Image: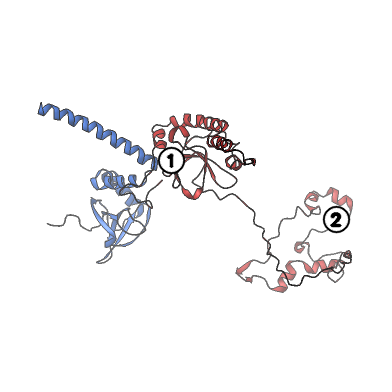
Amino acid sequence: MPFKRYVEVGRIALVNYGKDYGKLVVIVDVIDQNRALVDAPDMVRGQMNFKRLTLTDIKIDIKRVPNKKTLIAALEAADVKNKWESSSWGRKLIVQKKRASLNDFDRFKIMLAKIKKAGVVRQELAKLKKETTC
Amino acid sequence: MTYRSSRFLPFPPPFESAEQEDHCQYSEGRRPMAPKDRKPHVSRNPDLIRGVGKYSRSKMYHKRGLWAIKAKNGGAFPKHEKKAVAAAPAEKPPKFYPADDVKKPLVNKRKARPTKLRASITPGTVLIILAGRFKGKRVVFLKQLTSGLLLVTGPFKINGVPLRRVNQAYVIATSTKVDISGVNVEKFDDKYFGKKVEKKKKKGEGEFFEAEKEEKNTLPQDKKDDQKTVDAALIASIEAVPDLKSYLGARFSLKAGMKPHELVF
């Protein structure tokens, strides 16, 4: 199984530990064997250990250490935000965040909706069962 | 009186005549300040660092204009005579000295206040009661009473919780709010909920006693009417929100996988 996601300038990574947990950042330079220079539109460019990053499939076209303006333009051009939010990984994270922020009333409404859905499904199943046996 | 330079005066020079005072365009700013008008004076000696001022003692003497005050007073600092203290009336020696020294209790200036209400609890908040016979019930908060307890109602028709007092500590505040503007809760206070004081009845015959006991168990009609009026307006605003009525009718319970410290209420 060859590697598919490489550490390179322009690779988008997800921060999985620390103060910036959950943010999408761009690898803008490699410092040494363990650390990368990392940047994002809403954060100050800084170093991060690779262990704190999880690489994604997304890559943008930038030169080594661009300035903030160029970086933001490149992110817009590659449409990183939409690509991420439509990917299955990105969608899963959005659902997790939504579930964590649910109100007690929201959880109650979801329970009602689940029961309703299950009822509809069971009715359809009963119909189908009736057709095949009789 | 001449002054070295009017620039360094700590106070404006006095007018030489009444006419001058009237004609001076700045006379408004120069009236003697009444004790109430005085702004608290900021220090003339800024801190270099905490504990060290920028100016030395002699510089500060000059800055405060103490030389000008002395000059105005003829070389010495102006002295005021002390106010004559009225002689205190002669105290008689006490008639009785207690044998042991009794310690006086320390002074206590604390005032009784109702418990501080959590910021998340506002009138109309849905609360989850955690203890008592109504544990798990979701209930509408009306107001905080002077004793600190929270006045709460089911509404009675929805979940069987009447107008009731509940302690803030036994309650989880959710972020769901109900519109409570149509409800008048002015008349409810701690006395309304207190135990009724019965007049002492003489021990009568056996039957007499039992008859009295039966009467006590039922709720007086006016309390039932109060419940109805409070709930009428509430139920109208509750039915305006879909699913809210069944939400208030259901009890809260922790299910598998629910972590209370991670739940958002």
Task: Find residue A120 and report its horizontal and vertical position in percent.
Answer: 24, 31
Q: Which chain is red?
A: B
Q: Residue at x 72, y 73 (%)?
A: B58
> Which quadrant of the rendered structure holds the N terminus of chain A?
bottom left
> Pointer 1: what residue?
B138
Label 1, secondary structure: give it. strand
> Which quadrant of the rendered structure holds the C terminus of chain A?
top left
* Quadrant of the image occupied by residue A5: bottom left
> Pointer 2: what residue?
B15
Would residue A57 appear left or right of A81 to someone viewing this image?
Answer: left
Q: Chain of mark 2?
A: B
Label 2, secondary structure: give it. loop
Q: Are marks 2 and 1 on the same chain?
A: yes
Task: Find residue B2 and report its horizontal and vertical position in percent.
Answer: 85, 64
* Quadrant of the image occupied by residue A9: bottom left
Nearest to N terminus: mark 2 or mark 1: 2
Disc 1 marks which amino acid? Arg
Q: Residue at x 27, y 46 (%)?
A: A92
Q: Residue at x 31, y 54 (%)?
A: A25
| Residue B84 or residue A115, whichever sits in front | A115
Q: CA distance from mark 2 to mark 1?
A: 76 Å
- Above or below — where is A78 with respect to B181? below
